[in-house]
Amino acid sequence: MKTGIYSFFAALCFSLIFKPFIFAAERKYETEALNLLTELVPYRTVAGNGQVIPMANVIVKRFEDAGFPDEDIHLIPMYEDTAGLVVRLKGSDSSEKPVVFMGHMDIVDAKPSEWELDPFVVSEVNGKLIGRGVADNKDAISLFVTTMIRLKKEGVVPKRDLVLVLSGDEETGAKTTKELYTTYRHLTDAEFAFNSDAGGGNYDENGKAVSFGIEVAEKASMNLKLTATNSGGHSSAPRDDNAIYELADALVKLGKYKFPVRYNEMTLDYFRENAKQSSGEMAAAMRAFANNPTDERAANGIEQFPEIKGFIRTTCVATMLSGGNAPSALARKAEATVNCRIYPGVSVEDVKSQIRDVIGNPAIEISDLNIPEYTPGASDMIPAAYDVIKKAVQAQHPHVEPLPYMAAYTTDAKVTRSLGIPTYGVYGVYYGVGDGNSHGLNENITKQYFYDALDYWYIVMSEL
Ligand SMILES: [Zn+2]
């Protein structure tokens, strides 16, 4: 056992001699990460705009300058103007399967006229970084690239190969993603993948880290059009058949319908843990369901809370409505858009046939606006993946227990999961209150949390 005084001196020496260097190194990489983000945001990498490849070249140049060999850098042009990018940091043990780090280079467009600041420049206001892509997903790209380069420069060799895989059209079709994990599977195969486009931590309004979610499943989003048609006529001679009433009747039935309850161990754990961390009626409802998920009353209890009701079933809701052609004419057509969020593992056809049955009126035409692919069930938690995330999270926030959960949106993970790569959404930048707003106006993150994520990824990558 070390004597107290030895430990004291060891600690003192460490803090006096090594720490300043560590801090200097970290600050250097903080600047590098922010510089890269600042360089990436001006590329308007919207579908069809031809900017993905020029932006990918900026990233490639960073890796080349850091001494990554050409054979480990693969910029793959695809679908006319977009691309996938794969960069490998070789590990020491080729018998261990690689780990993939996932991100996407494209963005949802932003209209400069609607933003308070230019969306294609990184602005810093009161400690926040603002710009399109700073929260989704160019921040994560900057952090990955900087951390891989840091490992290389410091001579840290992980056991497994670390493979950065960036897709070029996550926001639109994820066709590049599919290519990357099928045609180019020899470059992207992995035991599991860490996805920067989902999951992550939150701070509460007092600046305390309160949670960290590991996204292990996703709900698919489906849009359907419901159309009622009629021969029309004069409104002075109404008839029983009426497009507006028939559509309204269908929507009321659909509004009251509840899809079958679904859950898995992850749902129950999530409810249990969240119930521990909060109080009130919602916590009680989560606890009741976790205790007995087959109890109908417990399921109905969850139903009272819009923010969690989607955790236990597929949901569909009418979101748009139109119909009729003149105030004094019987409508010839009435239409509604219905958005469904499909539970992982449930087929699109199954949901559509339930809707048809509920409406019970074959005269209502149900057509597809967008049909998602089947979303696979939850990724099983591989201990090696969970342990490294837990370690990295708790290095910064010892009281935070990472929890698996299901997202109501989809990312590239729908592709990797369905192709057999367990995928965990573990985005590293924590959100404070009001942070994020990806796809929306004034997308932003807190600069300090961006820097903190650099340490988080450093621990994850070096621990692998
Ligand atoms: Zn994204």
Image (cartoon, rainbow, N blue to C red):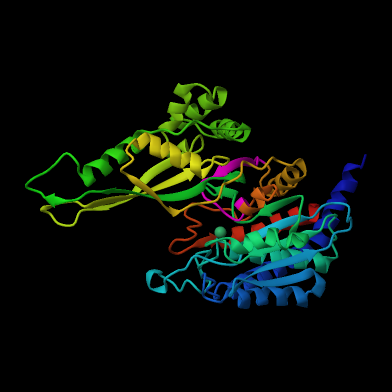
Start and end of the magenta stretch? Answer: 399-414
Note whether 159 is above or below 340 in the view shown: below
In the rendered image, residue 351, in percent from the top left (x then y), is placed at: 47, 40
Identify which residue is drawn at 65% across, 48% down: 417
User: Is residue 330 rendered to the left or right of residue 250?
Assistant: left
Q: Quadrant of the N terminus?
A: top right
Identify which residue is drawn at 56% across, 67% down: 106
Identify which residue is drawn at 45% across, 34% down: 259
Residue 5 seen in the figure: yes
Question: Depth check: 457 or 400 in front?
Answer: 457
Ligand 1 is in which quadrant of the figure?
bottom right
Note whether 268 is above or below 130 in the view shown: above
In the rendered image, residue 247, in percent from the top left (x then y), is placed at: 27, 44
Residue 21 seen in the figure: no
User: Is residue 334 rendered to the left or right of residue 449?
Assistant: left
In the rendered image, residue 292, in percent from the top left (x then y), is placed at: 55, 22
